[in-house]
Image (cartoon, rainbow, N blue to C red):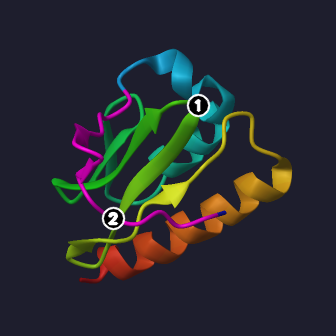
Amino acid sequence: MKLRKAGKRIGGFRWGIVSLTEELQDIKVLLKEISKFEKIKEKKTGTFYLKSKGFLHFHSKENKRWADIRVGQNWGEPVDIKFNPSALDKKKFMAEVKKRYDSSLHA
């Protein structure tokens, strides 16, 4: 798992939120697990809210995908999640999500 430098514009391009469900099919098991967290609502596929505040969503560009995940009251550094991730990559990603969830839940 690699953290990406935060920022909305890179090279003059505004990074878009992943809106196509098919781009998240390979991690649908992870999405289902996240949706079971206490006080989490999945407003649309891959876009999660915690206590009515944005918590996690995905972006992709040029065969790269990453998640913006809140840490406490603020957005943390983006977290890469490869397409077709290995079991180890999934485990690391979920560990980071759970850590940030715990921090955000009590913020």
Q: Splitting the image into 4 quarters, where does residue 75 fall?
A: bottom left
Query: Which residue does the image show at 74% across and 34% down from the upper left?
Result: 84
Q: Mark 1 points at which residue?
A: 63
Residue 49, label in figure = none
Task: Identify which residue, 36 or 12, lies in the foreground.
Answer: 12
Task: Identify which residue, 83 or 71, lies in the foreground.
Answer: 83
Q: Is residue 10 magenta-colored?
A: yes
Residue 6, label in figure = 2
Q: Splitting the image into 4 quarters, where does residue 74 fall?
A: bottom left
Neighbor class of circle 2 (other Cα within 10 Å; few <14, some 14-19, many 20+) is: few
Neighbor class of circle 1 (other Cα within 10 Å; few <14, some 14-19, many 20+) is: few
Is there a contact, CB below 8 Å, between mark 2 and mark 1? no
Answer with mark 2 or mark 1, whichever residue precedes in sequence: 2
* Amino acid identity at mark 1: Asn
Query: Which residue does the image show at 47% across and 63% down from the upper left?
Result: 4
Q: Where is residue 62 in the image (x, y as percent from the top left)?
A: 52, 30
Instruction: Tell me: residue 88, above or below residue 72.
Output: above
Magenta-colored span: 2-18
